[in-house]
Image: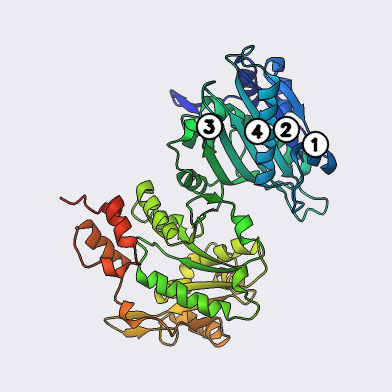
Amino acid sequence: MEITHKGDKVIDLTPSIKQKALRINLNDDIYGTFAEIGAGQETVRQFFRAGGASGTIAKAMSAYDKDFSDAIYGEEKDGRYVTEDRLKKMLDHEMDLIEKRLSRKKHPNKLFFTYANTVTTIDFAKQYKGHGWVGIRFQIDTTQVYNDIILHIRFKETDARLQQETLGTLGTNLIYGAFYKYNEPKSLLKYLYDHLNQDQLEIDTVNFSGPVFENVDNRLMSLQLVKNGMTDAVMFSPEGINVLPAAQLYKKNILALRGSFRPVTKVNIDLYENALKMFVNENKVDRDCTEVIFEITLSNLKSEGEIDEVDFLSRADLLCALGHKVLISNFKEYYRLVEYFSNYTKHRMGLAMGVNNLVEIFDEKYYRHLSGGILEAFGKLFFKDLKVYLYPLLSEEDGLKDSNNLKVHPRMKELYKFFKENGRVEDIKTYDPSLLGIFSRGILQAINSNETGWEDKVPNGIADLIKERQLFGWGQSN
C-alpha cells in the first residue's frame, strides 16, 4: 500500500488492480504468455478486462487435463502437479516457445515474460484449503538473461471462487511488481498484498533469481515474509537455500531445538546429539524419516530491538555450515510451534531444551490470551505423545538443575508433576559435564571484545568462520 498525507487526511495511492494491468498493457515493450493450471485463467482475466491486452498477451492457456498437461510439459514421475518442479517446467517451456516463435529482429525492444501458476483450490469437503506455486520469468533488459520470482502460497478462504479471485489479484500484483518494483524487492513483497489481506492468503516461500536480483539474499526475503506477517515460519536448507517447510516436514518425525544460537555453541550441539539419540530410540521413530530443526523465533531476533539482518544471517550461516535446517518462526510459545508441525505430520515429535526453557513453559503469563489458559496450551503442546528432552543447568546458587529439582511456580507444581510422572519430560543423562559452564552470551561478549579463549567453546570450524567473516563484531572493536 502506498499512502500520502494531505493535511489531516491519509490518501491511499495504491493503484487498483485494473490500473496495474492497464499500465502493463499500455507498455509497448512488455509482451508474454500466461499459463494457469488449477484455478481458471484468473490472472490473465484481469489483463483482458483492463483493455489494450492485444499488445501484451501473446497467448493464454490452461492445461487442465493431466494427459494434455503431460503432453505439453512432460510427465511427473510422482504424479504430483502442484509442485515447484512443475512450475519451473511450465516457465521453461513457455519461455522457450516465445523465443522460438517471436523473432528478435522483428521485436528488438520487446521485454518477454511468461507468468505461470499451478494450484489446487479448496476441495468439496472443505478439508484442504488449497495451495499452489506461482511464478514469473521476465526481463527488463533485452541483452540480459531472464529473471525469476517464484512463490508458494496457501489459501485461507473457504470458498473456491474467492480463492480464484485472490489468485488473480496476487498474479497481477506479481507481474506489476516484477516490471516496476524489481529494484525494491522488499517493497515488491509488500505490494503482493495490495487489495488483499493476510486472512485471504499466506506466502510461505519466495525465491528471486537472475541478474537484477544478483545482490538479493533470499533468506532475507524469507525473513521479510515472517516480519510482515505474510507467514508464520520459513525454512532454510543446510545449503542456505529457501525451502518449503511443508515439503520438508510432511509425514516426518520432528525433533526441534529452539535457541538464540548467537553464536551456536558446543552445548547446543551436545543437546542436539544426545536428544536425537534418545528420540530415535522412541517407539515408531525411524531415523531416516526424521527431521531435526534448529528454530529461531522472531521475538528472539528482536531481543536487541529492531531485527539486525546481518546478525540474523550470521546465526543462519553458522547453523547451515554445520549441516542443519533452520526455521525462522513467529511462534513465541512452544505450543504454537507444535501446532504448526502438526499441520504437516501426525508422526512423533520431540522438543530438546534446557532447564530455563522448560520453566518458562510453565509460566502462566504466556497463556493469558487463551480462553483456556495454560491448560489449553498444554493440551495442544503435549498431545500425540510429544516428549521434552531436558538438558541440565549448572547454577552457582543451586548447583545442578534437572527435571527432578527445577523450580516452577507453586501453582504449577502439580501440573508439572503430572507431565513428569507420565514420561513427557526426560532428562538427558549422557551430557558432557565439561560443557555446562558454556553460555552463548559470554562467548558473544568475548567476540565483541576481540578476546581469546572462546574458540574451544564453539563447534569445530565455527571460530574460523566467525573470524574469517567478522561475524558478531569480531575484529571491529576499537
Q: Which residue is mark 2?
A: 35
Measured along the vertical axis of the image, is residue 375 above or below residue 103?
Answer: below
The residue at which mark 3 appears reads as 1
Counting residues from the start of the chain, the first of labels 3 and 2 encountered is 3
SS assignment at label 3? loop
Q: CA distance from mark 3 to mark 2?
A: 27 Å
Q: What amino acid type is highlighted by mark number 3?
A: Met
Q: Is 411 located above or below residue 250 in the figure?
A: below
Marks 2,1: beta carbons within 8 A: yes
Earlier in the chain: of badge 4 and badge 3, it is 3
Q: Kindly identify which numbered label has been placed on residue 63.
A: 1
Q: Position of residue 236 (x, y in %)?
A: 51, 53
Tell me the amino acid under the disc marked 4: Gly
- In the displayed structure, 471 sits above or below 55; it is below
Q: Would you call the spot at circle 4 few (<14 residues within 10 Å), some (14-19), or many (20 or more)? A: many
Q: Earlier in the sequence, mark 3 or mark 1?
A: 3
Q: Quadrant of residue 20?
A: top right
Q: Identify the mark at residue 171; answer none if there is no mark.
A: 4
The residue under label 2 is which amino acid type? Ala
Lower sequence index among marks 4 and 2: 2
Residue 283 shows in this picture: yes
